[in-house]
């Protein structure tokens, strides 16, 4: 029953690319301004969703209204045009079924190209009924729309009539009147009162969608004036809704809202106008309305064209995770780019164990120049900065000599050169300047090269698969190497000494002044002491979650006790998330092995799952008492809804609200116990230091996360893990 009701509700809001229940109620009410049209639309949705369920189509898509919204439009359209009767409802049932078939068929065809079917099934459905009905003598044309006041009286008596009449007589600019009526025409209503209600619902659902609807419509309105087109075309059946739908779809639903998406809306407007005028002329010969055909043609072509881009992809970023909210798309994309935008497609680690020093970096002082400028030299240095012990005149004096060298990532050994003698200190082999080297293929046009290895120390052979961290040889002093070190670079070709490429290292620490700084993805610089993450067993186990696992907590908030149960799940795209059984809140996460990230939260912002999301937003699975980890929450996590409303309007252009996350590691007071305590802080406000903050203390034991203490203003919440 709950899924069936959700399927009906979402079928209404899908018309405007939404899943907002308040907006759905408003749209539902508007459709019943014509009682029989509203009933026909509702029955069409029910028929379609029942048929989809009986056939066995995807339950989630039925629940989200993916198949129902086109049938809704068909039902509303023919409900307006024809008188109700037994014959009408029989036709309604079968055309709803046919519209479902069109939806599934187009989903299969267009889905292969990653394109939506939009309202094309509605067009096919309503055109077929209109054409077929010319031979159906039992279907009578409706005259209800002629007597709007009678219709309003039937809905709400004289109060509704007076309200309707008052709105229609408001002294508003003609362009705004056409805008409201164009909005209402999407649901086959043609009066300003209905359009105003829809505009209010649209504003409630999304500030960006409302702004885009105005931009799209007025871009068309002034384009018509500029080219001298007949402005009455916009008011004829108020076909201007094509511009509104195009603006919302291309400006914020399928494309992440930005100044570039808004510019694209303005550019697409003339294309819609030309398509509308030309198709309207052609369809007039067969006495059919184009309805939403121009919107469908332009949006689908636009989305298809941008798939072929080879550059400037970030300017019109496609929405990869559909949240049915332009604001969420903007906030999430900006935060994702900030957190993961520079993450490489393959994570590369440093090619050694322990802590090494960068003795020559990119654009080096000696050899890293020109086509070979993107490379590093690494050595081991002590606390005083010395790279050797004793006199430094023999190879064995050097700390890095004969230390293991590891593969930076999984791959296949492509090239090996061995058997070159190690140089005496100060000498160099310019003939075999790369020395003993290994080249590993990690992907097409992505290779790593490690050079100056010790003679006869290479442990791998050409064609051999290797895992990240697997030893491939030992540090030496072969080739153009006066003292022991390793040379490390990335390249596009398999040959030793190929031109280098600029590629970052992932998840490593920098040690400076006895403090560690974590780098998600960056390029080490000269004199930095760097090391890979060495996972701590307690933290590793605490933040290792497996789909199917159930986690339970008992909370005490100011004396009020409650229980919470979370289930770890995985969707069809292999995205992992927690779902709270009590509140239905969800939070998605990524586990990269050495770093745990939360990415997205949905639900009420007062649940324990929400606080867990804030407290563990980014956790490095290591333990360094001096380590401080920083990050930024997406604005979708912002707890103050009122402060967020103004930001919603501005986010395509700039962001003034700030969020921050900070994590500190500390040991438990009892050093004999196996326990680690994490201190984290969430800040929200108009500045980086925040005006609202929440403090967390997370206790980690051998059993995992055993306790979470939350302090927010004067409120304290204690959550204890239970079995």
Image: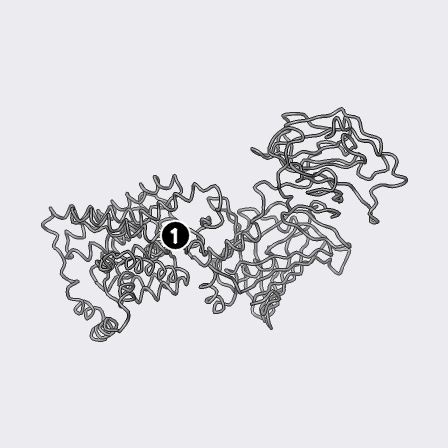
Foreground residue among 720 and 185:
185
Q: Is residue 606 visible?
A: no
Does residue 411 appear to the left or right of 645 in the view shown? right
Q: How are the colours assigned in the image? A: one colour
Q: How far across and how far down the image is residue 573, in percent?
A: 47, 44
Query: In front here: 59 or 329?
Result: 329
* Residue 723 x/y as whole percent: 59, 54
| Label total for image | 1
Specify the quadrant of the image occupied by residue 611. bottom right
Q: Give the residue furthest to the right.
A: 391
Tell which of 114 and 263 is nearer to you: 263
Residue 664, placed above or below residue 448: below
Residue placed under numbered mark 1 in the picture: 250
Residue 543 in sight from this viewpoint: yes
Q: Position of residue 634 (x, y in %)?
A: 53, 58
Q: Residue at left 67%, top 29%?
A: 496
In this picture, is 254 found above or below 165?
Answer: above
Residue 108, quarter of picture? top left
Quarter of the N terminus within the rendering: bottom left
Which residue does the image show at 14% across and 48% down from the upper left? Answer: 133
Percent position (x, y) of residue 365?
74, 42
């Amino acid at each position: 029953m709950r899924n069936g009701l959700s399927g009906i509700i979402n079928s209404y809001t899908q018309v405007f690319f939404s899943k907002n229940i308040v907006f759905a109620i408003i749209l539902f009410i508007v459709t019943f301004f014509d009682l029989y049209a509203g009933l026909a639309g509702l029955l069409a949705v029910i028929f379609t969703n029942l048929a989809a369920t009986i056939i066995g189509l995807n339950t989630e898509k039925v629940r989200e209204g993916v198949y129902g919204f086109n049938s809704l439009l068909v039902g509303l359209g023919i409900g307006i045009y024809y008188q109700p009767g037994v014959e009408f409802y029989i036709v309604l049932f079968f055309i709803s079924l046919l519209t479902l078939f069109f939806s599934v068929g187009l989903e299969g065809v267009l889905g292969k190209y990653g394109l939506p079917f939009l309202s094309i099934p509605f067009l096919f459905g309503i055109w077929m009924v209109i054409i077929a009905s010319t031979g159906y003598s039992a279907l009578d044309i409706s005259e209800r729309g002629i007597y709007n006041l009678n219709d309003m009286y039937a809905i709400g008596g004289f109060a509704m009539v007076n309200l309707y009449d008052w709105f229609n007589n408001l002294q508003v600019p003609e362009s705004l009147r056409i805008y409201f009526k164009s909005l209402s025409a999407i649901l086959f209503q043609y009066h300003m009162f209905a359009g105003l209600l829809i505009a209010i619902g649209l504003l409630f659902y999304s500030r960006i969608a409302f702004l885009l609807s105005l931009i799209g419509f007025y871009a068309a309105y002034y384009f018509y004036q500029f080219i001298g087109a007949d402005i009455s075309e916009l008011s004829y059946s108020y076909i201007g809704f094509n511009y509104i739908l195009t603006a919302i779809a291309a400006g914020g639903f399928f494309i992440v809202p930005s100044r570039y998406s808004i510019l694209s809306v303005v550019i697409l407007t003339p294309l819609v106008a030309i398509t509308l005028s030309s198709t309207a002329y052609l369809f007039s010969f067969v006495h059919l309305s184009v309805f939403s055909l121009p919107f469908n043609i332009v949006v689908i072509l636009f989305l298809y064209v941008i798939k072929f881009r080879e550059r400037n992809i970030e300017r019109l970023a496609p929405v990869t995770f559909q949240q049915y909210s332009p604001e969420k798309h903007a906030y999430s994309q900006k935060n994702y780019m900030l957190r993961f935008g520079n993450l490489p497609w393959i994570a590369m680690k440093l090619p050694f164990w322990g802590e090494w020093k960068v003795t020559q970096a990119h654009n080096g002082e000696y050899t890293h120049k020109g086509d070979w400028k993107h490379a590093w030299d690494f050595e081991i240095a002590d606390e005083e900065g010395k790279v050797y012990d004793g006199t430094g005149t023999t190879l064995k004096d050097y700390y890095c000599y004969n230390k293991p060298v590891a593969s930076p990532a999984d791959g296949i050994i492509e090239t090996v050169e061995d058997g070159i003698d190690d140089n005496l200190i100060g000498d160099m082999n310019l003939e075999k300047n790369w020395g003993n080297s290994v080249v590993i293929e990690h992907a097409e046009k992505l290779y790593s090269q490690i050079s100056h290895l010790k003679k006869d120390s290479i442990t791998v052979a050409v064609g051999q698969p290797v895992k990240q961290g697997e030893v491939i040889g030992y540090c030496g002093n072969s080739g153009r190497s006066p003292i022991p070190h390793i040379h490390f670079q990335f390249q596009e070709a398999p040959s030793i000494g190929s031109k280098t490429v600029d590629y970052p290292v992932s998840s490593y620490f920098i040690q400076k002044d006895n403090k560690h700084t974590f780098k998600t993805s960056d390029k080490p610089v000269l004199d930095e002491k760097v090391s890979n993450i060495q996972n701590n067993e307690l933290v590793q186990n605490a933040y290792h979650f497996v789909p199917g696992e159930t986690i339970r907590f008992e909370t005490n908030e100011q004396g009020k006790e409650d229980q919470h149960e979370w289930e770890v799940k995985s969707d069809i795209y292999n995205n992992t998330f927690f779902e709270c059984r009590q509140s239905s809140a969800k939070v998605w996460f990524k586990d990269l092995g050495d770093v745990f990230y939360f990415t997205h939260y949905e639900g009420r912002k007062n649940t324990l799952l929400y606080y867990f999301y804030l407290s563990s937003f980014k956790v490095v699975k290591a333990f360094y008492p001096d380590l401080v980890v920083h990050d930024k929450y997406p604005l979708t996590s912002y707890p103050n809804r009122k402060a967020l409303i103004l930001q919603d309007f501005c986010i395509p252009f700039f962001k003034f609200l700030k969020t921050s996350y900070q994590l500190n590691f500390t040991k438990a007071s009892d050093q004999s116990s196996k326990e680690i305590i994490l201190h984290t802080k969430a800040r929200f406000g108009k500045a980086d230091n925040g005006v609202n903050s929440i403090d967390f203390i997370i206790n980690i034991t051998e059993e995992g996360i055993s306790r979470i203490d939350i302090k927010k203003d004067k409120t304290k919440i204690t959550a204890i893990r239970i079995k």
